Image (tube, grey):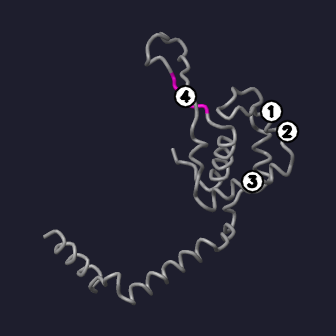
Amino acid sequence: MLQRIGRRSWQSTWRTPHSTPDSREAASHQKQIERRVQEFLLATVPPLPGDYYLPLAATAKGIVRLPERKVLEPDGIPTIAIKQLPRRVVVTMTRLFNGILRTGYFPGSWMMGRVISLPKAGKDTRLASSQHPIKLLFHIAKLFLRIMVRHLYRHLTPRQE
């Protein structure tokens, strides 16, 4: 019963009956799709259009603006070490950031962190409602997010009050 309903739905949607996988036509079609997918995966990623990329200067400026005295993040890399990175590492970091923009993939491991709670000022610290949770993220992730916010902010119009 369900197979019949599914077949009718398929046929009414696509207006052609589903061919069996044993047919030559289906095998040829499958090979063509596999070839196209392989070509897509092997193709070089085109450059980002217009100003949809982060320049090296933005990464360098973001590194300079990192606060010096921060708690060590989960990766254990202090901001002072990031500030002393050689230029070629900053170039590589900029390429990494642009790769994130180009592919749309943000590393999930960068969002892993340690959650700590800070007491709110003037509140009873024994109550859970008096605690303010924060998440300590990797400095590299925060750097990328800060650069992106600054980059995107130029394209936003201020809200009319």
Name the residue beneath numbered marker 2.
84
Label 3, secondary structure: give it.
Answer: helix
Look at the image and tell me in which quarter the N terminus lies.
bottom left
Q: In which quarter of the image is residue 135?
A: top right
Label 2, secondary structure: give it.
Answer: loop
| CB under 8 Å between discs 2 and 4 | no
Q: Residue 13 location, x and y as percent?
A: 27, 79
Q: In this view, does 149 lie above or below 99?
A: above
Q: Residue 48 location, x and y as percent?
A: 67, 66
Write the start and end of the magenta stretch as one range. Answer: 132-136
| CB under 8 Å between discs 1 and 4 | no
Q: Which of 29 and 105 is in front in this view?
A: 29
Amino acid bearing label 4: Val
Amino acid bearing label 2: Gln
Q: In this view, does 1 lie above or below 100?
A: below
Apparent side of residue 94 relative to residue 100 in the rendered image (left or right):
right
Label 4, secondary structure: give it.
Answer: strand
Amino acid bearing label 3: Thr
Q: Nearer the viewer, residue 31 or 136?
A: 31
Choose the circle earlier in sequence order: 1 or 4: 1
Rounded to the nearest whole Å, what is the CA distance between mark 1 and mark 4?
A: 22 Å
Name the residue beneath numbered marker 4.
115
Q: Residue at x 72, y 56 (%)?
A: 54
Residue 80: mark: 1
Q: Which residue of the protein is positioned furthest toward the front in this rendering?
A: 22
Choose the circle earlier in sequence order: 4 or 3: 3
